[in-house]
Amino acid sequence: MQRKEDKQFRLVDLLDDLFAGRDVFFKSVCLVKDMMTEDVKALTLDDTIEMCIKFMKENRVRHIPVIDSPTGEDEQQYFVGIVSQRDVFRQISPYLGKVGEEDSDSEALKQPLVRLVTRNPKSVSPETTIQEMVTTMVDNRINMMPVLVDRDMVGIVTSTDILKLFIRLDIIRRLCSKTPKTEERRRFVDLLSGDSDKVMPAFSTILRTVEDVMTEQVVYLEEQESLAKAMEVMQKGKFRHVPIVDEQKKLVGVISDRDVLRYLPYLRPGAESFHNRLFDVAPNNVATQQSLHQIMTRDVTCVLPSCDFYTVVRMLYEMNISCLPVTDEDKKLVGIVTVTDVMRGLLAAYSFFEKAMA
C-alpha cells in the first residue's frame, strides 16, 4: 500500500476526512518513515556489558543498536548490529548485585559488546511499507528493526512503537466512531465490500476484545515441572512465554525466555553465532533441574476474554510487558495475548483498509 510520493496531506484535509468518518490513520501512516523513531541512542563496539545493562535500565529498552566509530576524522559512524536483553541475560546470573552474585558476573560485566553483538540483522528502509516491516518482524520473531539508508542508521522501529501506533489509532477511532456499542459484530468479508466512508466505524466492530486476537491453544506447564521442560516446549513451539498453572488448571504464574536465560549458567561469548546459542547448556545441568515454582513470575496481571482490545494494548505498553494471560472469572487459563498477536492485528487492519479502498 504505497503512498504516492508527490501527494501531500494537509491538516485541513485530514480533519475533513476525520469528521466525515473516512479513513485518516491509514491514509497518512503507511510507510516506515511515518512511524520510526529518528532520535536513536546507540552504544559502540567498545562499550561493555555493564554499560549496556545501565543503558537499558535508564532508557527502559530491551534492544540497543551498536555502531562503530572509525578513528579517521573523515570517516562516519556506521551501524554494526544489535544487542538484546536476551543476549545480556545469558551473560549474568539472577543474583547480580545481590548476596548470591557469582564470580562469572564480574568477568561478564567487563566484556565488550563486540563479542556479543548480532551483526547484519534484518533491516528496512524508510520507504518500506509498514505491512512488509511488520510481516518480517512477526515471521522472524523480531522486536526491533533498524531503519537503514545504505549503512547509515536513520531510525528504528520496535514492538513498543507498534503498540503506540495502535494507541494513536484508538484515539482516531474514538473520534470517528458513529457505531453504537450494541451494533452486531461484523465479519471482515462483509466489511470489505462496504462504502469507504464507513470503513473506520465499521472497523470498530471487529477488533473489539482480547478474544479477537488471543491465542486459545495455549501450551502451559505445571509449577512442579522443571526449567528444562520449559526450555523444551519453548524451543519446540517457538514461543517465548509459558503460563504456569496449579492442579486445578488455575493460573499461578508465567515464565518467559528471559527468565530462562537468567537462570542458565554463564555462556562465554564466541563468534557471531552467540545469539543462536542462547539456550545451549550441558545435558542435566543442575540449573535446568530447578522447578518452575522457584523461578516463575508470580502475581501476574491477567485479563478476561471480554476485555477491550485497546485497553489491553495500553496495558502492554504502560506496563512494559510482552504478554497477558487470559483467564475466566475463576482464574482458569483460556488463552494468552502477546505483542506478536497485536502485531498480527495491525497486519489484518492494514490488509482490511487496503482492500476496502481498492
Image: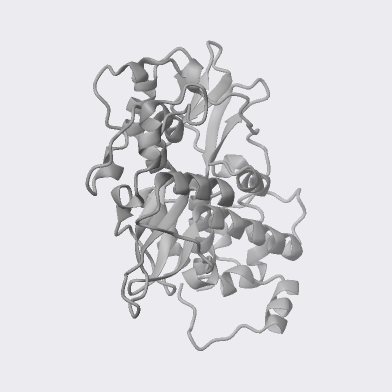
Instruction: Using the image as rendered, state which of residue 340 and residue 278 is in the foreground.
Output: 278
**Residue 228 left/right relative to 242:** left
Which quarter of the figure has residue 46? bottom left
Instruction: Using the image as rendered, state which of residue 261 and residue 242 is in the foreground.
Output: 261
**Residue 220 left/right relative to 284:** right
Is 332 located above or below residue 57 in the figure? Answer: above
**Residue 51 percent across, percent down from the top left:** 46, 48
Q: Is residue 180 visible?
A: yes
**Residue 319 percent across, percent down from the top left:** 63, 42
**Residue 205 percent across, percent down from the top left:** 65, 53
Question: Residue shown at 74%/60% (left/top)?
Answer: 174
Is 76 located above or below residue 8 in the figure? Answer: above
Instruction: Using the image as rendered, state which of residue 356 and residue 152 is in the foreground.
Output: 152
Which quarter of the figure has residue 289? top left
Question: Residue shown at 73%/77% (left/top)?
Answer: 15
**Residue 93 percent across, percent down from the top left:** 42, 29
Residue sitting farthest toward the bottom: 6
Question: Residue shown at 52%/18% (left/top)?
Answer: 245
Q: Is residue 238 visible?
A: no
Which quarter of the figure has residue 211? top right
Instruction: Using the image as rendered, state which of residue 7 and residue 263 is in the foreground.
Output: 263
Display colour scheme = one colour
Numbered-mark total: 0
**Residue 2 left/right relative to 330:** left
Question: Residue shown at 45%/44% (left/top)?
Answer: 50
